Image (spheres, rainbow, N blue to C red):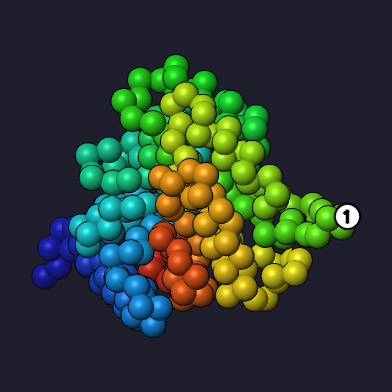
Amino acid sequence: MTQPGGGADDALHARLATLRSGLTAVEQRISDACAAAARPRDAVTLVVVTKTYPASDVRLLASLGVREVGENRDQEAAAKAEACADLPLSWHFIGQLQTNKVRSVVRYADRVHSMDRARLVAALSEAVVRSERETPLGCLIQVALEKDVKKGEPVPEHRGGAAPAEVAQLADAVASAPGLRLDGVMAVAPLTGGYAGDPAAAFDRLAEIASTLRAAHPAATMVSAGMSGDLEHAVAAGATHVRVGSAVLGARPPLG
């Protein structure tokens, strides 16, 4: 006879097994990539991106040892962070951030990976100062490698990210803003521009930008790059954090 709640328990155990399998496979990929690049495994941190997945998955991932969680929509992230407030998690906001969301984001995010304009720096700084945060908000400059063009060439339109030529000035603004801490840079392998279809070259370019940034700001050591399809290229280029969603959690459910 099936016990009450047995179906729910079976589903939970099945989901846990799926997550364990995905997490194990991704951890192995990172380990192999680190070995190939002659880097220690602990040089790379996995951020599991749980956008569109329920808070119950975050809880299961935490039971498997995951501590770094990424989200890209504030409404979803805020609800999950509240639902999982009892867990020892570090929350990474990785999506494009509108200034009208900053007061919410500073309540739960440990890091924002998408700093791309001076107005956002000012808004986040003001929100942190007005909040009851006890620690600075870590910030990464999002670099739009699509915008890496030669002098005189037109800069393509892109939804988010600072052009490489803008990184130094924006980094200085973050570093001097009250309540903010400059942690490094972030990028996504571009789909357009000179690096389209060549994530290895794209991440090598990001590594150059990160090196220049560290020369001016030695503590800004984070390089957030690489996702499910290209994490090996990112690790080879020196990424310190890879952001992986579907390879751990499975096919992403449709957005509601």
The location of residue 160, given as percent across then percent down, is 67, 48
Is the residue 43 above or below the residue 173 in the image?
Answer: below
Q: Residue extending furthest top? A: 130
The location of residue 149, given as percent across then percent down, is 78, 59
The location of residue 147, given as percent across then percent down, is 74, 56
- For the point 15% across and 58% down, the residue is 4
Q: Which quarter of the image is occupied by the N terminus?
A: bottom left
Q: Residue extending furthest front? A: 215
Residue that badge 1 annotates? 152
Mark 1 belongs to which amino acid?
A: Gly
- For the point 37% across and 52% down, the residue is 69
Q: Secondary structure at mark 1?
A: loop
Q: Is residue 219 visible?
A: yes
- For the point 31% across and 40% down, the residue is 83
- For the point 38% across and 57% down, the residue is 47
Quarter residue 179 falls in: top left
Between 255 and 97, the residue placed more toward the observer is 97
Is the residue 205 above or below the residue 230 in the image?
Answer: above
Between 128 and 5, the residue placed more toward the observer is 128
Count up the numbered dots: 1
